[in-house]
Structures are given as structure tokens and as C-alpha cells.
Image: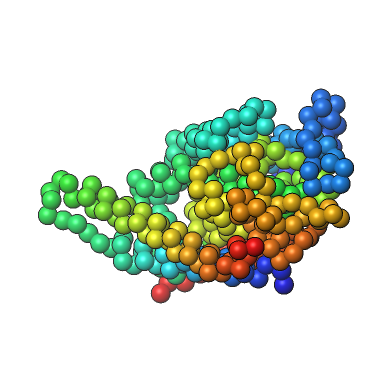
């Protein structure tokens, strides 16, 4: 079949979405920051948003590496 | 349930036949006003009328307004307003050459009615694991999502029939997913998108009689984005759109900035002597989905279209599996 690597890449992206969602829901969302009084909700949201953004950067970096690995032969063309 | 089935048939028929009937008149009108562009991938370079956005919008407005008579909800109003605004953005871009940043910014503004009407739920649901509540971050996601879906569909509109055919597959997957998660009202509101795309594909498929233009592609993409938000199926929608996302990802990771396709100096695809398409050997040309498909060897435009539709169908199946996984918790 033509473009089997692209099917594989789509599948890998799908797995990364599910795993990323799992990390977000199971580990990051339940975290709480307390002890800073009125600043607690702002710090709590801010830190979670920061972690989520770092995760997105890691996700794109991982995807980029996987892209190079899967399409290595093609990109050289 | 029977009333919903009858309504589904009614809005689907209105969406399909509005586009099916009005597009030939639009083609004639555009030809008369000499609003045509060259199809570089066709032998002889035929002139093809553009844009087809107006007939797409007619189909969407006719069907969604009919639906709103039976279900006068703010969600349908949000779909109507944001989709219409995206059409205007596209129409401006069809008529005038604007900078690469115009579309993302204007489409972000088009998303504001979704927030003002309060038609979003600040929960992001993931398969298997549940949801996260992100009230502030979700507003940013709404603003971000419409430009992303609009431009993603626009970026895949490179060959005859691809944007409309791809959108038909992705939006039907979204409708099926909405039925699976029992969100029947938004499922009904999503049906016109699939049927409008299907009717337009009849004229857009190889050899194209009309091109959707930015007004057509952005209208379809923005409507897809609004449905994902008001239907709370953001992740499912992203999965169904993966081949187009890959195209944008490959393009951006190779050019490393936001630019218009017309600003690209090296074309990622060239022609063989028998006018098949082949991947360029130019190292400065951006990597795109079509270039990757052609890395396996030259193909006709029609063959590439079918490879993209197979990829879209694969993603559609993954999106439907994801919808089933929404009810499963580990």
C-alpha cells in the first residue's frame, strides 16, 4: 500500500494524544498548590498551564523526532 | 427519536441540494465575470472558476436555519455566526492578497461569538481517563481552535477535490462520534457540514469545475472547529483531522514560520513528461503531505486524492474508536 509510513505516523500521533491526555487528567489535574493565601488559585492554574505548555512542546519535539525516524528515507529524497 | 430522524433527513437534504443546485449557477456567474484561476496540474492549464465559498455558505445557512426553527439553541446560533464570519474572512482573502498573519488573526476574532454566547463547556474530555476543567485556558483554546481548523483545511486544498472530499469523511466521522456520545442536537447540527462538502465534491473532484477558494475552505474548516467546541468533542475532532494536521505540521516544521502558500519560492511538487505529479528534488522546497505521498513515485492527481482519502478514512475510524473510548474509564 502507498504511504504506509503515513498511516503509521497517524497511529503514533493518536497514541500520543491518548497518553498525553492520560498524563494531564491523572497526574497534572489532581495537583494542588496551597499555603499562599489568596494567591493559591492563581498559582495553581498558572503552574498547571505552564506544565501543560511544556508537555505540548515535548509532544511536538517527540513528534518531530518520530517524523524524522519514520520518514528518514523519504525526506532524504 | 423518529422526529430526530426526520429532521436529520430534512436538514441533510436541504444542505446537499442547496449546494448541488446553486453551484452550477455560481460557476456560470464566476466565468461570466472572469473570476477564474489556472489549474497548473492539468494539461494545458485549464482556467477554473473560484471561489465556491458562496454556494457552500448558502447550503450551511439554509440547513442550519431550518434546524434552528425546531431547535432554537445558542449552539446553532454560534455555528451560524462564526461560520459566516470565517466565510467573510476567506472572501476578503480571495479578493485581496493579504499577509500570512491576516487569516489567523481574523479567524481568531471570528471565534469571539462562541465565547460571548457562552456555548462552550470548559472541560476537556479525554478517552479512558476522564476530563480536566480548564476555565481560563479553555477560552484561549476556543480562540486558537478556529484559526487552526480553518487554516488546516485551507492548507490541504492543493489538489482537485481533496479539501471537499477530506471534509466529507472527517465531518461524517464527527457526526457519528456525536451520536455515539449521545449528543444528538449537535450531531444534527453537524450533518449539514458533511452533506454540503459531499455536494460540493461533485463539482470539485478531478477534473474540477470549481475551486472552493479561501472562502470555501475556511468556511468548512471553521464550521468543523465550532462543532468540535459546542459539541465537546475537541479531541475526537482533532483525531479525525490528523492527515491535514500532519500536512500543516510537516509544512511548518520545514519552513519554520507562518507564511502563505503563494509566498513559497520552491514548489514541493513538479511534473513528469506525461504530466504526472512527482516529488521535487529541491532541498529548499517545503515538506508536505503530497510530497511525502509522491516519495514512493510519480502519481496522477486523482491517485494522490484517493491516497489522501484512505488516510482520512483511517483517521475517521480512529476518531470513532476514540468516541467509544470516551465512555470507558481506567
Q: Is residue A57 visible?
A: yes
Asked if residue B217 lies left or right of residue B208, the reply is left
Q: Residue at x 44, y 35 (%)?
A: B116
Quadrant where the image shows the C terminus of chain B? bottom left
Camera-nearest residue between B11 and B48: B48
Asked if residue B128 lies left or right of residue B303, the reply is left
Q: Relative to B203, is B233 above or below?
A: below
Q: Is residue B199 visible?
A: no
Q: x, y percentage for residue A22?
A: 39, 67
Q: In the picture, residue A53 is in which quadrant? A: bottom left
Q: Residue at x 78, y 60 (%)?
A: B299
Q: Relative to B202, is A56 above or below?
A: below
Q: x, y percentage for residue B106?
A: 52, 33
Q: x, y percentage for residue B147?
A: 53, 42
Camera-nearest residue between B233 and B221: B221
Q: Residue at x 56, y 40 (%)?
A: B259
Q: Residue at x 63, y 29 (%)?
A: B97
Quadrant where the image shows the N terminus of chain B? bottom right
Asked if residue B37 lies left or right of residue B261, the reply is right
Q: Relative to B208, is B128 above or below?
A: below
Amino acid at each position: 500500500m502507498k504511504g504506509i509510513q503515513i498511516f503509521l505516523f497517524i497511529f503514533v500521533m493518536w497514541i500520543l494524544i491518548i497518553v498525553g491526555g492520560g498524563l494531564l487528567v491523572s497526574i497534572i489535574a489532581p495537583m494542588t498548590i496551597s499555603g499562599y493565601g489568596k494567591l493559591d488559585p492563581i498559582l495553581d492554574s498558572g503552574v498547571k498551564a505552564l506544565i501543560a505548555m511544556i508537555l505540548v512542546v515535548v509532544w511536538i519535539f517527540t513528534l518531530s523526532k518520530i517524523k524524522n525516524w519514520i520518514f528518514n528515507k523519504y525526506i532524504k529524497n | 427519536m423518529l422526529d430526530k430522524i426526520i429532521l436529520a433527513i430534512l436538514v441533510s437534504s436541504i444542505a446537499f441540494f442547496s449546494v448541488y443546485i446553486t453551484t452550477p449557477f455560481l460557476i456560470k456567474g464566476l466565468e461570466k465575470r472572469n473570476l477564474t484561476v489556472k489549474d497548473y496540474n492539468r494539461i494545458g492549464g485549464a482556467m477554473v472558476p473560484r471561489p465556491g465559498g458562496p454556494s457552500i455558505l448558502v447550503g450551511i445557512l439554509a440547513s442550519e436555519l431550518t434546524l434552528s426553527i425546531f431547535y432554537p439553541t445558542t449552539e446553532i446560533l454560534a455555528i451560524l455566526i462564526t461560520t459566516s464570519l470565517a466565510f467573510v474572512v476567506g472572501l476578503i482573502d480571495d479578493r485581496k492578497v493579504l499577509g500570512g498573519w491576516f487569516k489567523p488573526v481574523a479567524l481568531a476574532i471570528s471565534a469571539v461569538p462562541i465565547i460571548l454566547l457562552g456555548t462552550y463547556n470548559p472541560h476537556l474530555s479525554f478517552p479512558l481517563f476522564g476530563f480536566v476543567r480548564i476555565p481560563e485556558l479553555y477560552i484561549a483554546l476556543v480562540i486558537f481552535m478556529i484559526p487552526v481548523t480553518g487554516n488546516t483545511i485551507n492548507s490541504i486544498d492543493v489538489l482537485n477535490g481533496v479539501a471537499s472530499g477530506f471534509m466529507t469523511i472527517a465531518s461524517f466521522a464527527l457526526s457519528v462520534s456525536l451520536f455515539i456520545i449521545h449528543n444528538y442536537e449537535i450531531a444534527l447540527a453537524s450533518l449539514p457540514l458533511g452533506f454540503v462538502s459531499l455536494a460540493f465534491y461533485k463539482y470539485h473532484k478531478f477534473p474540477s469545475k470549481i475551486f472552493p477558494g479561501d472562502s470555501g475552505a475556511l468556511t468548512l474548516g471553521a464550521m468543523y472547529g465550532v462543532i468540535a467546541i459546542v459539541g465537546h468533542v475537541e479531541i475526537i475532532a482533532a483525531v479525525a483531522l490528523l492527515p491535514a494536521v500532519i500536512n500543516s505540521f510537516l509544512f511548518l516544521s520545514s519552513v519554520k514560520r507562518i507564511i502563505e502558500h503563494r509566498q513559497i519560492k520552491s514548489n514541493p511538487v513538479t511534473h513528469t513528461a506525461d504530466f504526472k505529479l512527482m516529488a521535487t528534488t529541491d532541498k529548499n522546497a517545503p515538506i508536505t503531505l503530497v510530497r511525502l505521498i509522491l516519495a514512493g513515485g510519480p502519481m496522477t492527481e486523482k491517485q494522490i486524492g484517493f491516497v489522501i482519502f484512505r488516510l482520512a478514512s483511517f483517521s475517521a475510524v480512529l476518531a470513532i474508536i476514540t468516541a467509544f473510548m470516551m465512555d470507558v474509564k481506567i
